[in-house]
Image (tube, rainbow, N blue to C red):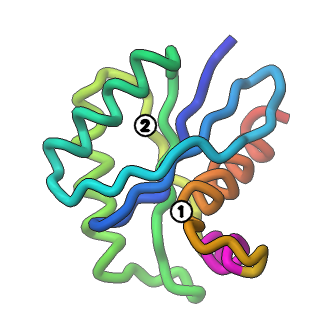
């Protein structure tokens, strides 16, 4: 069984979701509220180890017309940093995931956005 970690990356907060390739259902997991990149990585590594994560899926922000944004480049650098964990790291379209979470009336929507990112990835790759 593979376990996947979904990430909605932000420089202030990082939403996390978890799923496995058998149940194929992503669930919100946690929000990291640590601004320091090194501390973020330490916390993510602890989660990877404690949850036996095999793959990482990071939401890549883009404009609705698919153009890159300033946050796209920041997230791409974060993805490159995650590759130091020696796990497969994939990017996935995150357009409208935060809005979908907010429409549910969720104030701390980052983990729910990560769930939408991860679920979309699962639906495309683990049918």
**Mark toward the viewer: 1 or 2:** 1
CA gap between label 1 and label 2 equals: 19 Å
Figure quadrant of residue 99? bottom right
Residue 121 pos. (x, y %): 68, 47
Instruction: Determine the residue positioned at 40% across, 56% down.
Output: 14
Q: Nearer the viewer, residue 89 or 22?
A: 22
Foreground pick, 15 / 70: 15
Image mark for residue 127: none
**Secondary element at tag 2:** strand
Magenta: main secondary structure: helix
Q: Earlier in the sequence, mark 1 or mark 2?
A: 2
Q: From the top left corner, tell me how far across and down residue 65 is, in percent.
A: 57, 88
* Residue 53 horizontal side relative to residue 116, left or right: left
The answer to whether the residues at label 1 and label 2 have Cβ atoms under 8 Å apart is: no
Asked if the magenta segment contains residue 98, the reply would be: yes
Q: Which mark is residue 89?
A: 2
Query: Which sits in the foreground, 104 or 24?
Result: 104
Pointer 1 local density, CA inside 10 Å: few below 14, some 14–19, many at least 20: many
Q: Where's the N terminus, which quadrant?
A: top right
User: In the image, residue 16 lies at what x, y percent?
Assistant: 51, 47
Instruction: Give the class, few, some or many, for how many residues have Cα within 10 Å of label 2's Cα (few <14, many ≥20).
Output: many
Asked whether, in this view, residue 40 is left or right of residue 65, the answer is: left
Q: Mark 1 highlights which residue?
A: 110
Percent of width and height locating residue 6: 55, 44
Q: Is residue 8 above or below residue 100?
A: above
Instruction: Say left or right for 40 vs 7.
Output: left
* Chain part drawn in magenta: 96-102
Q: Residue at x 58, y 30 (%)?
A: 4
User: Can you tell which quarter of the image residue 39 is in?
Assistant: top left
């Amino acid at each position: 069984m593979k376990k996947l970690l979904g990430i909605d990356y932000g420089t202030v907060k990082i939403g996390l979701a978890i799923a496995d390739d058998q149940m194929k259902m992503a669930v919100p997991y946690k929000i990291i509220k640590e601004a320091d990149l090194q501390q973020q990585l330490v916390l993510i590594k602890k989660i990877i180890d404690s949850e036996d994560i095999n793959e990482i899926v990071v939401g890549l922000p883009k404009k609705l017309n698919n153009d890159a944004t300033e946050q796209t480049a920041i997230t791409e650098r974060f993805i490159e940093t995650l590759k130091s964990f020696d796990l497969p790291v994939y990017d996935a379209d995150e357009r409208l995931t935060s809005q979908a979470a907010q429409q549910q009336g969720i104030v701390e929507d980052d983990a729910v956005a990560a769930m939408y990112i991860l679920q979309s990835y699962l639906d495309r790759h683990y049918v």
